[in-house]
Image: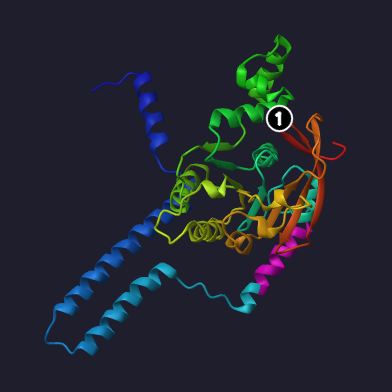
C-alpha cells in the first residue's frame, strides 16, 4: 500500500524513538545479565530438587553435588571481585594523573566553596548525612546543592518523602529569583516579580533535575527507581533523599532502631553499587535542645547509631545565635565526621525567604 510522505515520516520517527541506542547499552546489558542469572538460579534449584529426590544416591554425594551446583550459580552473580595490588596501583596512578591535569575538584560540587574544599566535593560511592532539628534548613540546603549541581550540567535525582514536587519547585524558583517563597506558594506576586519568575523558569527548564515524591520509600524501591532513571539518563551525578527517618526498611525488624540501621546500611551499599554520591537528610533527637550547649553531636542522630557508622560524612546545621527577625540567618555547617578528610565548621548564611544557602560574604 502507498504511504504519504507525512505518514512515512511519522513511522520513521516512531521507529527511531523506540530503537535502543548505544547511550543506554550499559543499562540494557545489566537487565540481560540479571535475567540470565535468575535463569541460572532456577535451573540450579531444579537440578538440586532432582538430586534430592534420587533415593539411590548417598546423602553425602547428593549434598556435595547440590552445593557445587549452587556455588556455580552464585559465582555467576558475584563474579570475580578480587583485584591484585598491581592492578589497583595501576588504576590509582591513572586516576591521580588524570586529576593532576585539571584544576577542578572531582565529584559533584555543593555550590558552597568552603564546604567543597573541606569535603573535596560530593564523591561517587559515598553517603553524606545532613542532619538538624526541624526548621533549620535541611531541605533548603539539599535544594541549594541540587540546583548548583544541575547548573553545572550534573544529573540530579531528588526523592522527597516530606514535601511534594510543587513545593520543591517553588523553593527552586525562590532561590533563582530571590522572591519570597511564601508569595510563590500563595501566588501573590507583583508584575515585576512575574517577569523575574518567567525568566527564571525559562532558564531552569532544561536543567537535568528529576523529582520523585513517592511515599513509603524503601531502599529496594529506591534502587529500582534509580535503575530505571539510569536507563533513560545514562548517568547520575547526585542522588538526594529527604529524609531518612521517613523511609521504611521493607522487611520486618524487631524495633525502629534496627529498621533505621538497616536502611542506612542499604543506602551506603546503594551508593557504592551505583557509584553515585548519596546526600540524605536526617532528623536529630530532642536531646540537643535539652543541653546547655545547642551544638549537635553524633549521638544526637535520631533512632540509630548505625547512621553515624555507615555515613562517610555527617554534616550538622547549627545556628549558634538564632535570629528570628534576621532574613539572613548566620549558620554553621559542622562536619562532625569525615571518613576521608578533616572535620571542622563552615560558616554560611541561610536566606530564609528565598530558602537559599550561600557562603559568608556571597
| Magenta highlight range | 89-101
Nearest the viewer among 1 and 152 is 152
Is residue 280 shown in magenta?
A: no
Is any part of residue 104 visible from this angle? no
Which residue is at 66% across, 23% downward?
A: 182
What is the count of numbered marks?
1
Task: Look at the image and tell me in which quarter the C terminus lies.
Answer: top right
Q: Are there few (<14), some (14-19), or many (20+) residues within 10 Å of tag 1?
A: many
Q: Position of residue 199 (x, y in %)?
A: 68, 20
Corner quadrant of residue 98? bottom right
Q: Residue 322, position in %: x, y?
A: 79, 39
For image coordinates 23% across by 75% down, the residue present is 48
Image coordinates of residue 187 in percent, x first then y, are 62, 16
Q: Under tag 1, what secondary structure?
A: helix
Q: Quadrant of residue 169?
A: top right
Q: Which residue is mark 1?
A: 175
Can you name the residue that lies furthest to the left here? 56
Residue 75 in percent (x, y) is at 40, 73
- Quadrant where the N terminus lies? top left
Q: Is residue 90 magenta?
A: yes
Amino acid at each position: 500500500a502507498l504511504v504519504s510522505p507525512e505518514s512515512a515520516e511519522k513511522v520513521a520517527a516512531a521507529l527511531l524513538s523506540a530503537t535502543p541506542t548505544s547511550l543506554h547499552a550499559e543499562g540494557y546489558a545489566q537487565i540481560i545479565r540479571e535475567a540470565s542469572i535468575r535463569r541460572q538460579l532456577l535451573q540450579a534449584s531444579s537440578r538440586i530438587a532432582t538430586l534430592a529426590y534420587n533415593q539411590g544416591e548417598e546423602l553425602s554425594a547428593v549434598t556435595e553435588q547440590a552445593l557445587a551446583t549452587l556455588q556455580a550459580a552464585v559465582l555467576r552473580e558475584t563474579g570475580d571481585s578480587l583485584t591484585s595490588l598491581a592492578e589497583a596501583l595501576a588504576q590509582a596512578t591513572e586516576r591521580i594523573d588524570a586529576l593532576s591535569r585539571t584544576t577542578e575538584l572531582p565529584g559533584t560540587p555543593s555550590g558552597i566553596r568552603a564546604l567543597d574544599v573541606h569535603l573535596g566535593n560530593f564523591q561517587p560511592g559515598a553517603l553524606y548525612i545532613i542532619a538538624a532539628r526541624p526548621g533549620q534548613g535541611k531541605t533548603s540546603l539539599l535544594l541549594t546543592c541540587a540546583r548548583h549541581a544541575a547548573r553545572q550540567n550534573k544529573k540530579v535525582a531528588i526523592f522527597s518523602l516530606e514535601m511534594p514536587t510543587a513545593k520543591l519547585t517553588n523553593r527552586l524558583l525562590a532561590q533563582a529569583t530571590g522572591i519570597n517563597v511564601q508569595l510563590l506558594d500563595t501566588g501573590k506576586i507583583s508584575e515585576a516579580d512575574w517577569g523575574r519568575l518567567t525568566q527564571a523558569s525559562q532558564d531552569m527548564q532544561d536543567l537535568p533535575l528529576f523529582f520523585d515524591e513517592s511515599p513509603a520509600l524503601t531502599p529496594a524501591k529506591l534502587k529500582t527507581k534509580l535503575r530505571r532513571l539510569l536507563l533513560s539518563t545514562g548517568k547520575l551525578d547526585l542522588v538526594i533523599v529527604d529524609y531518612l527517618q521517613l523511609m521504611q526498611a521493607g522487611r520486618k525488624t524487631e524495633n525502629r532502631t534496627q529498621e533505621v540501621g538497616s536502611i542506612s546500611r542499604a543506602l551506603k551499599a546503594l551508593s557504592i553499587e551505583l557509584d553515585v554520591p548519596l546526600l540524605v537528610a536526617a532528623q536529630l533527637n530532642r536531646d540537643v535542645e535539652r543541653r546547655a550547649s545547642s551544638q549537635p553531636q553524633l549521638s544526637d542522630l535520631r533512632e540509630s547509631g548505625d547512621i553515624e557508622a555507615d555515613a562517610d560524612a555527617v554534616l550538622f546545621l547549627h545556628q549558634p545565635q538564632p535570629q528570628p527577625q534576621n532574613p539572613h540567618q548566620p549558620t554553621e555547617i559542622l562536619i562532625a565526621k569525615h571518613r576521608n578528610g578533616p572535620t571542622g565548621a563552615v560558616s554560611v548564611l541561610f536566606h530564609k525567604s528565598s530558602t537559599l544557602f550561600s557562603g559568608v560574604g556571597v
